[in-house]
Image: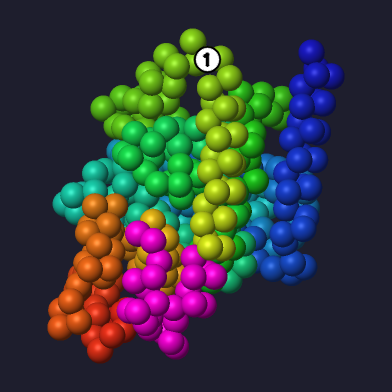
């Protein structure tokens, strides 16, 4: 049994090392998100064993739990033990935003992560988290990009965001923690099934897995297929943009030659390239239909949080509010 645990620990270390090696540049800062939970504790332990250098941890103090100060202290002690610098960022979660507490906390957390200096940010989401994300997005009626779940790697402002544990199961992570004698904190809110993600994890996926034992792995695998499809749609949109673009605007005559699905795909792609929030599917489709059918004297416009898309003088403009 001891040999088996040691083998698992070595395997996980090798996998994470192989994932990171081609993605890191020498002397580049490497930030690791550390909540104090099992997943992030294991990830930071792996980074410490890999001796990558320039590793720092960042803990986001949301202030939502009466135990939040104790969690921060745990992270301080753990990082001191590993000899890894720790930054603690206190955030205010806007619970009046209408986003829900989970989404609002996530937004505050990622805003704190974005304040890290240039380099790489590594987060500890694993295969179970990916399965939950895919299921959650599908139940919301997501498109291909949402069905792809969390990308294993993406740009995040001036950082490169990496998820080296995304193909690792929760059981493997817990086995590693046990083999290494690691301690971690338990967030009491993780047991609250009135929160959507907890409901999916503890009830929906548990029930599904009783009938489909490989459900978690299958959903994560499906995410990879959707990611490939999303990549192809991005390539198609990039080609279409070359055909319709005049500088940073689009010619209406050229846009109208695109089919409705291709036009919607191009609009979504352009908004993502600009870093704008993509509207819900119904609003985007209605605007695309207006673009295809509007008379020359009409000027369709779609107002978004980041700016507006507006037709003027035969061209579609993206007018930023910033």
Name the residue rendered at 77%, 58% in the picture: 22
- Give the quarter of the figure containing the C terminus: bottom left
The local crowd at label 1, few if under 14, some if 14 to 19, many if 20 or more residues have their Cα within 10 Å, is few
Q: Is residue 223 above or below residue 99?
A: above
Residue in the foreground of this view, choosing between 308 and 40: 308
301 relative position to 39: left or right: left
> x and y percent of residue 239 in the render?
54, 70
Please tell me whether residue 36 belongs to the stretch shown in magenta.
no
Name the residue rendered at 52%, 52% in the picture: 230
Q: Quadrant of residue 303?
A: bottom left
> x and y percent of residue 7 in the render?
82, 26
Q: How many marks?
A: 1
Please tell me whether residue 258 belongs to the stretch shown in magenta.
yes
Residue in the foreground of this view, choosing between 140 and 91: 140
248 relative position to 116: left or right: left
Q: Quadrant of residue 178?
A: top right
Q: Which residues are magenta?
A: 237-260
Name the residue rendered at 45%, 37% in the picture: 134
Residue in the foreground of this view, choosing between 159 and 311: 311
In the picture of the structure, the residue carrying the numbered disc 1 is 212
- Give the quarter of the figure containing the N terminus: top right
> x and y percent of residue 205 in the render?
44, 21
Residue in the foreground of this view, choosing between 10 and 318: 318
> x and y percent of residue 198 in the render?
37, 28
Q: Is residue 166 visible?
A: yes
């Amino acid at each position: 049994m001891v040999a088996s645990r040691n083998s698992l620990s070595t395997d996980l270390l090798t996998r994470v090392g192989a994932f990171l090696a081609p993605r890191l540049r020498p002397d580049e800062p490497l930030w690791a998100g550390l909540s104090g939970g099992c997943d992030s504790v294991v990830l930071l332990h792996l980074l410490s064993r890999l001796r990558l250098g320039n590793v720092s941890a960042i803990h986001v103090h949301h202030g939502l739990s009466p135990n939040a100060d104790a969690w921060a202290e745990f992270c301080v002690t753990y990082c001191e033990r590993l000899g890894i610098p720790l930054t603690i960022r206190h955030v205010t979660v806007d619970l009046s935003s209408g986003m829900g507490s989970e989404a609002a906390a996530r937004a505050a957390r990622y805003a704190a992560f974005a304040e890290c200096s240039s380099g790489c940010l590594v987060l500890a989401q694993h295969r179970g988290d990916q399965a939950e994300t895919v299921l959650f997005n599908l139940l919301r009626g997501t498109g291909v990009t949402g069905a792809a779940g969390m990308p294993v790697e993406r740009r995040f402002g001036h950082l490169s965001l990496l998820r080296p544990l995304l193909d690792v199961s929760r059981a493997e992570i817990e086995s590693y923690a046990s083999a290494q004698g690691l301690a971690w904190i338990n967030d009491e809110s993780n047991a609250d099934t009135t929160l959507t993600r907890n409901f999916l994890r503890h009830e929906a996926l548990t029930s599904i897995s009783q009938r489909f034992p490989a459900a978690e792995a299958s959903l994560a695998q499906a995410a990879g297929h959707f990611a490939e499809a999303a990549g192809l749609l991005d390539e198609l949109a990039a080609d279409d943009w070359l055909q319709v673009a005049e500088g940073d605007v689009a010619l209406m005559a050229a846009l109208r030659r695109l089919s409705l699905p291709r036009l919607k795909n191009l609009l979504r792609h352009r908004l993502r390239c600009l870093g704008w929030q993509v509207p819900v599917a119904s609003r985007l489709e209605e605007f695309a239909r207006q673009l295809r059918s509007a008379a020359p004297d009409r000027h369709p416009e779609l107002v978004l949080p980041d700016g507006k898309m507006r037709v003027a003088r035969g061209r579609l403009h993206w007018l930023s509010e910033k």
